[in-house]
Amino acid sequence: MPLQAYALTSENAPYPTGVSLSPNPVQTTAQTLNGFYAGDAGVVTITLPAGSFPDSSSLRAEECNNDATESTECDGLTLQTTNANGTSLQANSDGSATVTFTLWELPTGNTPDAASSNNPAGFDPGSTVTCSDTVPCSIWIGPDPSNFSNESFVFDSVTPIAAATQGQVPESPSVPLLALSAVGVGGAGSIIYGVRRRRASHS
């Protein structure tokens, strides 16, 4: 199955039956990791119907520039192999999936935050992906980032809203920092996967 692109814009019809992404826009809050400011993030929930993926297959998800068509337009530091609640990110036995994805404002550190005095740049200030309240971005979901256009989906025009309280960290942070757990603040650089592939337009 070729890459499917779902764009939430005024020019597009509603998503097909069984496909959803919410909320959009998504409210962010400031996040910390090991006492250091990591950036502003919120959680979006994406559902895809039966037959979307190979049955019970492991899935991956990552944040990309809007209208991404290849993996080099994505930020490898945001790659998730688990849902926001820590459960494995995988398709159900009928090939459907529900994904809870941690969406970051990117590059991190661009929004002035009361919480950002400790590590103000966040975990990914050099990101080549832009995702903000003025520049929407994409979320890619599929089994294998190195095969970006196979059995995969791109959701375009996803928008994070800057933290409502200027980034003040809540008493109980609402977003598990799963995307950062493997690399840590200031960890490895962006991962580049694969080669350019054609995208099949969705109509």
Image (tube, helix red, strand yellow):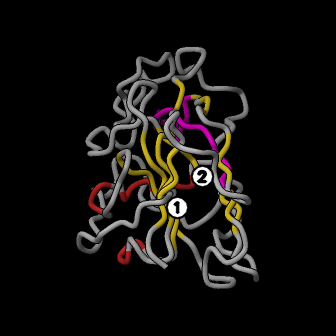
Dot 2: what SS? strand
Where does the image place residue 61, in percent across and percent down from the top left? 51, 62
Count residues near mark 2 (Cα–Cα under 10 Å), then give few for <14, some for 14-19, many for 20+. many
Where does the image place residue 146, in percent across and percent down from the top left? 35, 76
Dot 1: what SS? loop
Where does the image place residue 159, in percent across and percent down from the top left? 50, 34
Answer with the quarter of the image where residue 23 lies: top right
Question: Between disc 1 and disc 2, whose residue precedes?
Answer: 1
Taking the magenta stretch, the answer to whether it contains residue 19 is no
Q: Is residue 60 left or right of residue 82?
A: left
Q: Is residue 34 visible?
A: no
In the image, 137 versus 200, the foreground residue is 200
Taking the magenta stretch, the answer to whether it contains residue 40 is yes
Q: Amino acid at mark 2?
A: Phe
Q: Which residue is the site of mark 2?
A: 101
Magenta residue span: 30-46
Residue at 54% in and 21% down: 167
Where does the image place residue 43, in percent across and percent down from the top left? 63, 43
Residue at 42% in and 30% down: 132
Residue at 69% in and 83% down: 56
Q: Is residue 155 above or below residue 1?
A: above
In the image, 113 versus 56, the foreground residue is 56
Q: Cα distance, mark 1 to mark 2?
A: 8 Å
Residues at circles 1 and 2 in contact by the CB criterion of under 8 Å: yes
Count residues near mark 1 (Cα–Cα under 10 Å), then give few for <14, some for 14-19, many for 20+. many
Residue 80, numbered label:
1
Q: Is residue 100 above or below residue 108?
A: below
Q: Amino acid at mark 1?
A: Gln
In the image, 51 versus 57, the foreground residue is 51
Task: Please identify the dominant SS of the magenta region.
Answer: strand
Q: Is residue 189 above or below residue 26?
A: below
